[in-house]
C-alpha cells in the first residue's frame, strides 16, 4: 500500500448509505437492521442500508418489489431537513481536518488531504478523519486519498463501507485501476463507454494507459481531463468556494389549481421564503427577479423587475415580486405552478445603502430576518413565516411538505 | 389496517416476558431483539399500558370468544366519537410499538398506537386498535385505506 510519499494529496469523503445512517444517528433501534428510506410519497426506496442491499434491493426500486426481496425490511419516511443538518455538521468537522474543503453534495466532500498531526502518514490520517466524523457526527463514511480527485473517488468507492485508504504509489494505483471497469468513473457511462470499447478500453487502467490524443478525440477535452486525473495529475481543483450561480430559482406545482388571487399571493410569499433561504445559504443577493405562472389551459405569464439595489431582504423582495405577479396574473384563469427566478446575483458583502434606504430601516429588516432564521433553525422550517401564507394551511400542516426534494443541493430528484 | 406490531425486547419487563412466554414470539431481524405481536397469531395479543403498568392483553375478538364484542381487532376513531362504544365502558389506552406491520411492510413507529380497552362478559380485558383513514403517504407505502392512530406522530 502506498504510504505518504508526499505530504499533501486530494481526499474524497463519501458517507455510507447516508440517509439511512442519518436516521440511525437519532434512532439507534435501526442499527443492524435492514432499513430503506422512502421517497416519492412512499412509493420507492431512495436509500437502503447494507443489510437491505445484501437482499438485492436497489436504489429507486418500488417498495412492493423491495418488500418481496427483503421481507424484514423497515421503511422510513425521508426527512431531508435532518439530512441537511448532519451534512453541515460533517462539513464543519471536515473544515477542521483540512485547509480546503469542497461541498460536493449532501454526503460527499473533496478536500486537500494533509497529515492530521506532525509526521502522520496520509493512510493514518485517512483513518483519523473517518473516525472523527464517525465520532462527532455519528455517520459512517469512507475516505479515499490519492493524487487526483478522480483517483480519490475511485478509491473511496472501492473501500466502502467504513473504509479509509490512501493510495499514492503508482504501482498500487495501477492494480486498483485494473480492477475497476471504466464505467465507474463519474462522467463515463452509456455512449462514452461504448465509444471506448472498440479500442479495447474496458478498465480504468486501460483508459489511463491509452494514448492521450486518442482519448481526446473519443471523449473531447473533458475526457482528456479525466485521463490526466487517472494518471495522477490533478486537473480538477478543489473548489472551496463554489462559483456564483447564474440563477437561483424556487417554485413548482401547486398540487391543485388556484384562481383566488389571495392563494396565488400566498404561494408567491412561500416561494420567496424558500428563495431567501437559498440566497442566504449561498451568501448571495438578487439583482433581477422574475415571476412565472403557468395555467392549466396551457397559458403562462411572466413578470420581471430589476431591483434598485441587490437584496435578500424579505420586504424588498415581496414588494418586487408583487409587481411581477400582477403582470404574470391572468384573471379567472386556473394557475397550476409558479417559479421565482433570481438572476444578476451578487456576492453578499457589506454594501452601501441605496439612495432611498434608511439605515434604521435596513438594520431592522436585517434583525427581523436573523430572528426568523434562528427560530426556524431551532423549531422547524417555516415555523415562523409570513401571515400571507395562511391560505396554504394544509400545505404547511403536512410536515412532509416542509422540505421539497428540489431544495436539496446536488442530488438526484426522486 | 395494521396487522401486527413489533416491540424492542428491552421495552418489556423480563417478568412479563417470562410470565407470557413472549420469547416464543422473539424475532431476530438484526440489531436489537424484538418481540412480535401479530393478529394472525393463534391467540393474538398486544402489550398495553394500563394504570402505569405494561400488560399483555387479548387483541380483539377474532374467534368470537365474546358474543357482545365486534369480531375484529380494530375500530375507527369515528365510531368511538359517535358513541359506538358508549355502553361498553371502553377506556382509551396506549399500545407501545417500535414497528407496525401492514401488507408485508414494516414501518417505524416512534411511540405507539392508540387503543381501546373493554371488558367482555367473562371480565377479560380485550384491546382494539384504533384506526383512521390513511394519509397519502401511508396509502402509497402500504396500499391500505386505513392506518393506526399513532401517538403524537404523523406519517
Ligand atoms: Mg454516499
Image (cartoon, helix red, strand yellow):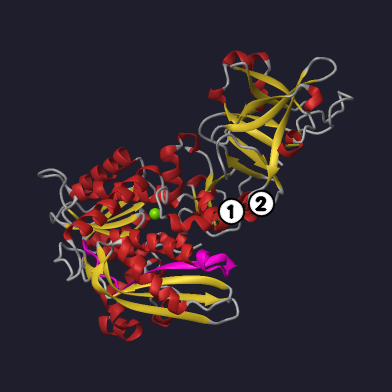
Res. B31 visible in picture: yes
Tell me whether the residue at label 2 lies in contact with that at label 1, contact meaning CB atoms closer than 8 angstroms.
yes
* Spot occupied by residue A311 in the image (x, y as percentages of width and height): 26, 66
Which residue is at a point 31% across and 81% down the rendered structure image? Answer: A215
Q: Is residue A105 above or below residue A319?
A: above
Direction from residue A399 to residue A121 in the image, left or right: left
Which residue is at a point 61% across and 54% down the rendered structure image? Answer: A63
Q: Which residue is mark 1?
A: A42
Q: Nearer the viewer, residue A99 or A245?
A: A245
Q: Callout 2: helix, strand or loop?
A: helix
Region in magenta: A238-264
- Crowd tier of the residue under label 1, counting other residues whose Cα lies within 10 Å: few below 14, some 14–19, many 20 or above: many
Q: Would you identify the image quadrant in which residue A8 lies?
A: bottom left
Q: Is residue A294 above or below residue A80?
A: below
Q: Nearer the viewer, residue B63 or A80?
A: A80
Which residue is at a point 32% across and 62% down the rendered structure image? Answer: A315
Q: Callout 1: helix, strand or loop?
A: helix
Asked whether residue A119 is drawn in magenta, I would say no
Res. A17 visible in picture: no
Direction from residue A287 to residue B62 in the image, left or right: right
Amino acid at each position: 500500500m502506498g504510504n505518504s510519499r508526499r505530504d499533501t494529496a486530494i481526499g474524497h469523503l463519501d458517507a455510507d448509505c447516508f440517509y439511512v445512517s442519518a436516521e440511525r444517528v437519532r434512532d439507534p433501534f435501526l442499527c443492524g437492521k435492514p432499513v430503506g428510506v422512502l421517497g416519492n410519497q412512499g412509493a420507492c426506496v431512495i436509500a437502503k442500508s447494507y443489510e437491505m442491499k445484501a437482499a438485492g434491493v436497489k436504489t429507486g426500486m418500488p417498495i412492493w418489489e423491495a418488500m418481496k426481496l427483503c421481507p424484514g425490511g423497515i421503511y422510513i419516511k425521508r426527512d431531508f431537513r435532518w439530512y441537511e443538518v448532519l451534512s453541515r455538521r460533517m462539513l464543519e468537522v471536515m473544515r477542521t481536518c483540512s485547509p480546503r474543503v469542497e461541498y460536493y453534495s449532501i454526503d460527499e466532500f473533496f478536500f486537500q488531504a494533509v497529515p492530521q498531526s506532525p509526521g502522520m502518514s496520509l493512510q493514518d490520517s485517512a483513518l483519523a478523519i473517518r473516525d472523527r466524523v464517525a465520532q462527532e457526527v455519528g455517520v459512517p463514511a469512507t475516505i479515499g486519498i490519492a493524487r487526483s480527485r478522480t483517483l480519490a473517488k475511485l478509491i473511496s468507492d472501492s473501500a466502502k463501507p467504513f473504509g479509509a485508504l490512501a493510495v499514492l504509489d503508482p504501482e498500487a494505483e495501477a492494480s486498483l485501476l485494473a480492477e475497476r471497469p471504466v464505467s465507474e468513473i463519474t462522467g463515463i457511462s452509456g455512449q462514452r463507454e461504448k465509444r471506448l470499447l472498440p479500442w479495447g478500453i474496458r478498465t480504468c487502467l486501460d483508459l489511463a494507459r491509452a494514448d492521450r490524443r486518442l482519448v481526446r478525440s473519443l471523449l473531447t477535452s473533458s475526457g482528456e481531463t479525466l485521463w490526466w486525473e487517472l494518471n495522477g495529475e490533478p486537473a480538477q481543483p478543489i473548489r472551496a468556494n463554489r462559483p456564483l450561480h447564474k440563477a437561483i430559482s424556487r417554485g413548482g406545482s401547486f398540487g391543485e389549481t388556484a384562481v383566488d388571487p389571495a392563494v396565488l399571493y400566498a404561494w408567491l410569499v412561500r416561494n420567496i421564503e424558500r428563495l431567501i433561504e437559498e440566497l442566504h445559504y449561498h451568501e448571495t443577493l438578487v439583482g433581477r427577479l422574475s415571476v412565472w405562472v403557468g395555467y392549466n389551459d396551457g397559458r403562462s405569464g411572466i413578470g420581471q423587475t430589476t431591483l434598485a439595489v441587490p437584496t435578500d431582504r424579505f420586504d424588498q423582495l415581496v414588494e418586487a415580486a408583487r409587481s411581477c405577479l400582477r403582470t404574470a396574473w391572468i384573471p379567472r384563469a386556473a394557475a397550476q405552478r409558479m417559479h421565482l427566478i433570481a438572476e444578476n446575483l451578487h456576492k453578499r458583502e457589506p454594501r452601501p445603502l441605496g439612495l432611498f434606504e434608511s439605515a434604521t430601516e435596513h438594520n431592522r429588516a436585517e434583525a427581523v430576518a436573523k430572528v426568523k432564521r434562528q427560530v426556524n433553525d431551532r423549531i422547524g422550517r417555516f415555523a415562523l413565516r409570513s401571515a400571507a401564507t395562511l391560505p396554504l394551511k394544509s400545505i404547511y400542516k403536512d410536515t412532509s411538505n416542509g422540505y421539497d426534494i428540489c431544495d436539496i443541493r446536488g442530488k438526484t430528484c426522486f | 389496517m395494521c396487522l401486527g406490531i413489533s416491540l424492542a425486547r428491552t421495552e418489556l419487563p423480563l417478568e412479563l416476558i417470562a410470565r407470557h412466554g413472549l420469547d416464543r414470539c422473539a424475532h431476530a431481524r438484526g440489531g436489537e431483539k424484538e418481540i412480535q405481536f401479530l393478529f394472525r397469531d393463534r391467540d393474538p395479543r398486544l402489550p398495553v399500558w394500563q394504570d402505569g403498568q405494561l400488560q399483555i392483553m387479548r387483541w380483539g375478538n377474532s374467534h368470537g370468544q365474546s358474543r357482545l364484542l365486534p369480531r375484529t381487532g380494530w375500530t375507527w376513531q369515528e365510531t368511538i366519537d359517535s358513541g359506538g362504544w358508549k355502553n361498553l365502558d371502553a377506556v382509551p389506552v396506549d399500545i407501545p410499538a417500535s414497528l407496525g406491520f401492514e401488507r408485508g411492510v414494516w414501518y417505524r413507529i416512534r411511540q405507539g398506537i392508540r387503543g381501546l380497552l373493554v371488558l367482555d362478559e367473562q371480565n377479560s380485558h380485550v384491546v382494539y386498535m384504533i384506526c383512521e383513514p390513511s394519509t397519502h403517504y401511508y396509502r402509497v407505502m402500504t396500499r391500505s385505506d386505513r392506518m393506526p392512530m399513532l401517538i403524537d406522530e404523523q406519517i
